[in-house]
Image: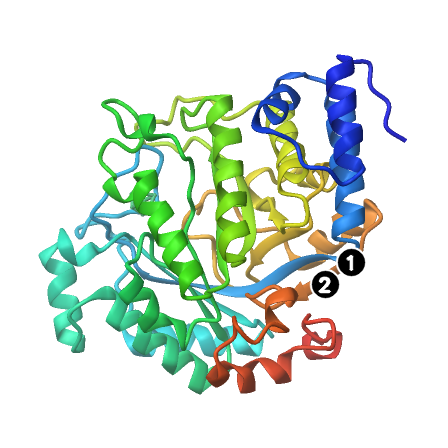
Amino acid sequence: MLTTKSDPGVYETLARRLEGRQISKTEAMELLLCQDYPAILSTAKSLREKTKSGPITYSRKIFINVINLCRDSCSYCTYKKEPTDELVSMMRPSEVIEIAKAGKKLRCTEALLVTGERPEQRYPQARSWLHSLGYSSTIEYIREMSENILHKTGLLPHTNAGSLTKKEMSLLKDTNISMGVMLESSSERLAQKGMPHEMAPSKNPKVRIKTLEDAGDLRIPTTTGLLIGIGEEPQDIIDSLFLIKGINQRYGHIQEVIIQNFAPKPGTPMSATLPPANSFFLTIVGVARIVLGEMNIQVPPNLTPYTFGKYLEAGINDWGGISPLTIDHVNPEFSWPSISSLRDVTQSKGYSLRARLPVYPEFLFDNRFIPEGLRSYVEPICDDCGLVPEEYLV
Ligand code: SF4
């Protein structure tokens, strides 16, 4: 039962939402600022029970760090490297397949292919690397590697290469079961002088929205999300949630919304910026569930390694991709928890844990979203619920 000591208006909003009615941006903003965490979290959790009553899921993956040069520069990023950096990655086809095969042995089902934003536009080294392999763009190379991975290992590719054009996504669609592009924030202010996206034109919300809409037109199951704590205002967070919800209402292709906390990294311009306060971040996760309703919501467990179980109290239903083999190259400072500890934490909160594919079950059973050519790869690693069969994992 909902109990709250806060403003009667907040109580009414939460009660109405539990009855299945939608809330406005103004009401969502009141929830975000009301500081009645218990009421927000209990409502979010109840909504999760109503709309996502199954197990908590994760995707067993390998992370293929194809090329970590990037034409953009975000003030919080440690993924992007320079050509002279000893940690620069420009993977050859044999290296890509080697990791994919190792992942297959460990019963992974997702091959996450990650690159910086259009590295060949900025770095001659990236252009020569691509030319030496016979390609003129990163996306052409990713397409070929996706096909190789599928044919040689059966792992399902999911590419996250930043803002892509519709033509580029069309090239990838037949080999990628899903794709990812973070909105991060709908705030254009973050691109102003001194702000984290000042030197990252691809993070302009208009560009990201166009990619999300084009992915919707192409019926590509798409992961997106928010990065919290990079200088956005509370109103920006609410606007971003409603923006994603609106795009999904029009196209129905947003398979998952990640709510990710900013974590300051040494050596970056934002190394001294404080991360979002735990209680505020938890409230945002709860408000995300209240706004987004039946959509899938994920918080990465590795970015708050000792306390991630609390997000189950705020209505999430997924932990995202977890690798038993490779590191999180975007956040190398934060190891993923082992799958057994993820299971222990999930069970300690009263839920079961199941592995899903890199595409959520509701999309698997909708013919509009899964290209015919991918079905034969999906069937051996998918049960009647659209999850990875337990016997496949042992
Ligand atoms: S966050 Fe992405 S777009 Fe920004 S610098 Fe890093 S790799 Fe490039």
The percent position of residue 192, horizontal first and vertical second, equals 26, 25
Q: What residue would you read off at disc 2? A: 354
Q: Nearer the viewer, residue 353 or 360?
A: 360
Q: Amino acid at mark 2?
A: Arg
Q: Give the label, 1 or 2, closer to the camera.
A: 1
Up-down relation of residue 271 to residue 351 (above or below)? above
Q: Residue at x 80, y 47 (%)?
A: 49
Q: Amino acid at mark 1?
A: Gly
Q: Residue at x 60, y 75 (%)?
A: 107
Q: What residue would you read off at disc 1? A: 54
Q: Looking at the image, how many numbered discs can be counted on the residues?
A: 2
Question: Mark 1 and 2 residues: CB-CB less than 8 Å, in contact?
Answer: yes
The image quadrant where one finds the C terminus is bottom right
The percent position of residue 175, horizontal first and vertical second, equals 41, 76
Up-down relation of residue 54 to residue 361 (above or below)? above
Q: Earlier in the sequence, mark 1 or mark 2?
A: 1
The image quadrant where one finds the N terminus is top right
